[in-house]
Amino acid sequence: MKNYDEAVGIDVSKNTLDVRCYLAMKHKVFSNDIRGCKSMLKWVSQQTGKGSVFYCFENTGNYSLKLSTYLTSQHIVYVEESPIKIKRSCGLVREKSDKVDSEIIARYAWLHREELEPSELKGLFYQELGRLIGLRDQLVRNRAGLIGTLKESRQLLGSPSTDTVCLVLTRSIDYLSKQVKNIECRMVALVKEYREVHKSYELLRTMHGIGFVVALQLIYHTHNFRRFSTWRQFSSYCGPAPFEYSSGTSIHRRKKCHYLGDRKMKSLLSMASISAIQHDPELRKYYQKKVAQGKPKMIALNNVRNKLLSRAFAVIRRGTPYVALNQFAA
């Protein structure tokens, strides 16, 4: 991005786009739709002339998806950056508004132009899979809330409304369970439409602890294991990777996981590790060995999480199902 003549920062919200040309020092607001995007490109070309321009904005989920889709269709270079990177690079800021945010994004894009890499729009498969995963998680949370309410209602003293409440809650839970099942069937059908993805899914399911949800989450976050070159990079992304904490000769703390990371993926890996310890003799022995060495149980569990990730990447790299070699030992 270092060869570009101008950086344009965009603060994306639900209805508007606050656009800031960094060197031209111009600001304008557009609507967050196709018409607004067209007007934005025309306005930016008027401010920058014939110079080369790249756009930078924060990843805000569905709000920024429309903008990135349009820029991709027009073959325009853009950078979709993590909001926390931009926030931590701006220093002390006393004012908060969409205009100020667009100025901060534009400044970040220009100062870091030599380090930034152009972003690419997710494929249709990953967009669809991401929406299905998000909807399933929401329905599962809603169902869990209703189940908790049902348990509390059954403990109440008998009243004319208690039976009605329990009946309505039971029907709602059954309905949500059916919808979750339908979404899971759609997810499986979607995976089967892509041969490489389906192959990776089947390979992951050969491992102890890796079930339906964890396998699909791994495929989604790693873009079928192409987004990260090693399991250590993905471990750093989702949280289980330990990092050193030391300074000079007086501060030497034990390595620990950083709080930044994909908490949902980290939680799923924790559940997968607990399941693997229960059903995989090799991982159970590995976990017990770490505990016997004096390590806290959570650190030993974190070691199992990383072990699962290394196995998953190895299985995909080899293209063969996982085989527990210890069962063939003499």
Image (spheres, helix red, strand yellow):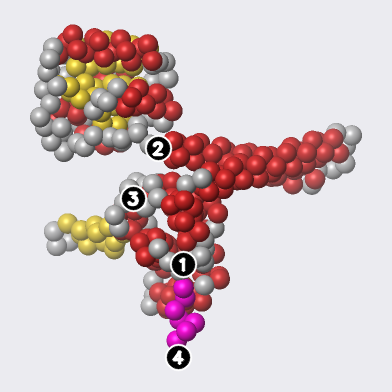
Choose between 107 and 77: the one closer to the eye.
77
List the residue tagged with mark 4.
330
Which amino acid, by three-letter code, is at mark 1?
Answer: Pro
Please give left or right for residue 40 compared with residue 54 in the image: right
Tag shown at residue 321: 1
Is 3 part of what is drawn in magenta? no
Tag shown at residue 123: 2
Question: Mark 3 and 4 residues: CB-CB less than 8 Å, in contact?
Answer: no
The residue range painted magenta reads 323-329
List the residue tagged with mark 3.
226
Position of residue 139 relative to residue 90, above or below, is below
Is 328 part of what is drawn in magenta? yes
Please give left or right for residue 170 compared with residue 11 in the image: right
Residue 174, how many percent across, how many down? Answer: 74, 42
Tell me if mark 2 has few (under 14), some (14-19) or many (20+) residues whose alpha carbon lies within 10 angstroms of its own. few
Q: Is residue 34 visible?
A: yes
Mark 4–mark 1 Cα distance, whole angstroms, equals 22 Å
Which amino acid, by three-letter code, is at mark 2?
Answer: Gly
Mark 1–mark 2 Cα distance, whole angstroms, equals 27 Å
Position of residue 201 relative to residue 117, above or below, is below
Of labels 2 and 4, the one closer to you: 2
Residue 26, how many percent across, how many down? Answer: 19, 11
Q: Is residue 81 visible?
A: no
Question: Mark 1 and 2 residues: CB-CB less than 8 Å, in contact?
Answer: no
Mark 2–mark 4 Cα distance, whole angstroms, equals 48 Å
Residue 205, how many percent across, how many down? Answer: 52, 61
Classify mark 2: helix, strand or loop: loop
Instruction: Give whichever of discs 1 and 2 has the lower sequence position.
Output: 2
Instruction: Give whichever of discs 1 and 3 has the lower sequence position.
Output: 3
Tell me if mark 3 has few (under 14), some (14-19) or many (20+) residues whose alpha carbon lies within 10 angstroms of its own. few
